Image (cartoon, grey):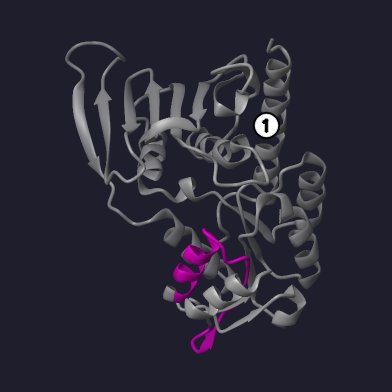
Amino acid sequence: MAKRGSSVTLRIGLIGCGRWGRLILRDLTSAGAQVHVAAPTDATLAQALALGARTAERDILALGPMDGYVVATPTATHAAVLEQLLPTGRPIFVEKPMTADLASARRLAAAAGDRLFVMDKWRYHPGIEAMRAEISAGAIGEVLAIRTQRWGWGNPHDDVSALWILAPHDLSITQHLIGEIPPLRSTTVMHPAEPDLGFTVQLAGDRGPSVSMDIGIASPGHQRRCLVVGRNGAIELRDGYDDKVFARIGPPGRTGAAERVIEVGRKMPLQAEIETFLSFVAGGPPPMSTACEGLRVVERITEIEATLAIDARRAP
């Protein structure tokens, strides 16, 4: 997989090797890449070497020439790291979201051209891809609505709110399924005094599908669900680890609609997106989620964040 031509192994610079970065390192090495890690602490440097990194340095520039880079640092540092890497001229894959502020996202999208891509792993989920294929084939007719649920317990990231960690997933799913992210219509919080605990976001234009994203960090259970309702049927992924999606073909809500179960397999989305990026570095087609698409996600989250802040100020 990670070959350029027939004999040269790709050299990939992995920036960051923490909770998620170590999984990226695992999949990069299993795909055949030679990985060189830049990380800020002795613990993460030692972890990187133990997990198969060829070298580990504190300074990005100390890594030497790379064929491509993967950025897995905290969200708040993405902009600074990407701006340091852009002068290398090499392809870059950055963990979602591209950045956590609109000004840097606009700057990077303008400067990066076709070299910067966002790691929206849900666009590589076999269930989401099967749903997109069914929609494209006209199996459920015109899409009327998308409903997503993303609930769990807590936010392990201390640099940004859960909104910036969770909402990019559902926005990228929307982009993948219908080719766009509709305008923001409204937000509703679980409790106005603590808007980050849970909220529902409504997206809708004057025409086209509506999108409802239900997101929160106060559920004892873990839920990842996506439902698409069309004029002639509905299709649903009920859990992120399911190996099938479920459909009813017939007018929504009508009795007698035929049930379908579509097997999708269990390939992990992270593995799929890593393999796609390595193929691109070696001369293949580009990954999904360009810098311009990453910018659209940042734009929408910025709008959502502003409304949630207004709601929060209304708290007694």
Task: State the residue in front, 258 or 246.
Answer: 246
Instruction: Describe residue 9's horizontal placement relative to residue 149 as left or right.
Output: right
Magenta part of the chain: 5-29
Instruction: Describe residue 271's horizontal placement relative to residue 266 as left or right.
Output: right
Instruction: Describe residue 14's horizontal placement relative to residue 123 as left or right.
Output: right
Instruction: Describe residue 117's horizontal placement relative to residue 107 as left or right.
Output: left
Q: Which residue lies furthest to the front in this view?
A: 316
Percent coordinates x, y for residue 241 in the rendering: 32, 46
Q: Which residue is drawn at 64% across and 37% down?
A: 161
Q: What element carries label 1?
A: helix
Residue type marked 1: Arg
Residue at numbered disc 1: 300
| Quarter occupied by the N terminus | bottom left
Q: Is 238 part of what is drawn in magenta? A: no
Percent coordinates x, y for residue 240 in the rendering: 36, 42
Q: Which residue is drawn at 56% across and 52% down?
A: 288
Quadrant hosting residue 227: top left
Is any atom of residue 1 visible in this view? no
| Quarter occupied by the C terminus | top right
Quadrant hosting residue 301: top right
